Image (tube, rainbow, N blue to C red):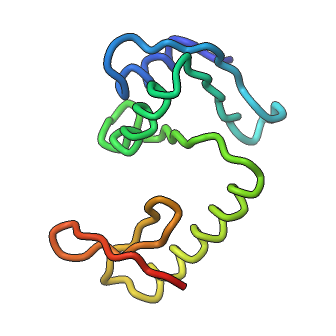
């Protein structure tokens, strides 16, 4: 069952102040094989941006390590993202000594001291 207090606990670690949620619901068909994602609609875009900008910090939390936060994407955006993730995996396999990331819809190689160089293809 969906536990609103658990979702609010995750969101509150990512925002300043009490999280203000307009809507909270599970999406997809209910099955025994997997846990369905939760869709959260915030009262303001700024709060949503704030939570998304800090989403990577969840990996540092023992409690929320397995939680993943992603923006809502259209079908076209999901297809483009999937292709980019596939390219990222290929690069990581081909060049294991280098650090690759996806930043703002582009595959980038992280250089010395955290500098980023865009890769165009």
Give residue 98's position: percent from left, percent from top: 32, 80
Q: In which quarter of the image is the C terminus?
A: bottom right
Please report the residue visible at 64 percent of the width from the left and 29 percent of the height from the top.
38
Tally the marks: 0
Please report the residue visible at 45 percent of the width from the left and 27 percent of the height from the top.
46
In the foreground, 2 or 46: 46
Give residue 73's position: percent from left, percent from top: 67, 46
Give residue 63's position: percent from left, percent from top: 37, 30
Q: Quadrant of the N terminus?
A: top right
**Vertical side of 84 occupied by 97: above or below:** below
Spot the residue most to the left: 113
**Vertical side of 16 occupied by 100: above or below:** below
Q: Left or right of 30: which side holds 73?
A: left
Please report the residue visible at 44 percent of the width from the left and 80 percent of the height from the top.
119
Quarter of the figure with residue 23: top right
Give residue 54's position: percent from left, percent from top: 36, 38
In the foreground, 21 or 68: 21
Please report the residue visible at 55 percent of the width from the left and 14 percent of the height from the top.
21
**Vertical side of 56 occupied by 78: above or below:** below
Spot the residue most to the right: 29
């Amino acid at each position: 069952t969906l536990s609103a207090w658990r979702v609010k606990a995750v969101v509150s670690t990512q925002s300043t102040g009490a999280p203000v949620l307009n809507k909270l619901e599970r999406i997809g068909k209910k099955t025994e094989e997997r846990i369905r994602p939760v869709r959260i609609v915030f009262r303001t875009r700024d709060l949503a941006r704030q939570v998304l900008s800090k989403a990577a910090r969840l990996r540092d939390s023992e409690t929320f390590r397995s939680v993943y936060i992603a923006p809502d994407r259209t079908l076209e955006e999901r297809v483009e993202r999937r292709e980019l993730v596939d390219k990222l995996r290929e690069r990581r396999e081909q060049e294991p000594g280098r650090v690759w990331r996806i930043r703002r819809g582009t595959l980038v190689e992280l250089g010395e001291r955290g500098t980023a160089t865009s890769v165009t293809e």
